[in-house]
Image: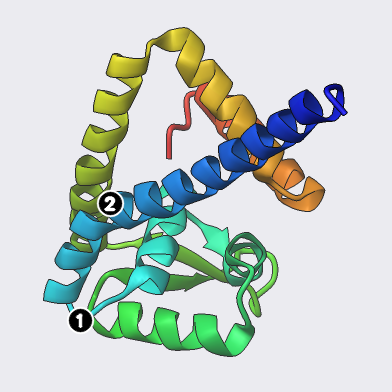
Amino acid sequence: MADIKPIGKALFLREEELRRGIEMMFFAYRDFTGEADSILAEQNMGRAHHRAIYFIGRNPGITVSELLGILNITKQSLSRVLSALVETGHVVQHTGPEDRRQRLLYLTETGNALEARLTEVQGRRFAKAYREAGMSAVEGFHRVLQGLLDDRTGQQVDELGQARQSAYRSGDDG
């Protein structure tokens, strides 16, 4: 019987460790999105608009199809979001050079200003956390986040990173 107690305690501690991580993720997400949500509310926008603005800003000229793949939402949902962003002057759409059915998305000056404002408040939070945790903790944090991703999502993240590195090397910083 004495052998079972340490195993039971270890399982309990493991369960608590996992639950603590889950809770911290919920609270961190709440706080991470809080300031941005306030800014978005001023514009009568929500998180779906934020995600679209962020990824269009990070990937100027992204196609609607590519954005759908990143956001993993329905065409109908994206259509509502993009219509609102175009209507409010945050996003413009251009026809693809080879395929006229293709719609390429770009932020306008207004869209860029909003994206910069949102990213600045969230970036400040990340910078503070990174500074306080130290580089080895940041690397560990990235590994944990990578481990939370589905295989398909991990591949998407890798592809986006590779495309940005390639653009950076070629001098096209978007």
What x and y, as percent, mark residue 114? 21, 58
Which circle's residue, 1 or 2, is located before the other in the chain?
2
Residue 160 visible to an observer of this rendering: no
Residue 109 visible to an observer of this rendering: yes
Determine which quarter of the picture holds residue 54. Answer: bottom left
Type of amino acid under label 2: Asp
Q: Give the residue at the far front of this rendering.
A: 1
Type of amino acid under label 1: Asn
Q: For the point 66% across and 70% down, which residue is it?
A: 65
- On screen, residue 169 above or below 106: above
Horizontal placement of 147 versus 28: left or right?
right
- On screen, residue 136 above or below 116: above
Classify the position of the C terminus by image quarter: top left
The residue closer to the viewer here, 45 or 105, is 45
Q: For the point 43% across and 54% down, which residue is it?
A: 26
Can you identify the residue that label 1 sits on? 44
Q: Secondary structure at mark 1?
A: loop
Circle 1 Cα neighbour tier, 10 Å, few/some/many (<14 / 14–19 / ≥20): few
The residue closer to the viewer here, 38 or 21, is 21
What x and y, as percent, mark residue 57? 39, 52
The residue closer to the viewer here, 87 or 93, is 87
Q: CA distance from mark 1 to mark 2?
A: 20 Å
Horizontal placement of 108 versus 164: left or right?
left
Horizontal placement of 46 versus 6: left or right?
left
Circle 2 Cα neighbour tier, 10 Å, few/some/many (<14 / 14–19 / ≥20): some
Q: Secondary structure at mark 2?
A: helix
Determine which quarter of the picture holds residue 155. Answer: top right
Can you identify the residue that label 2 sits on? 31
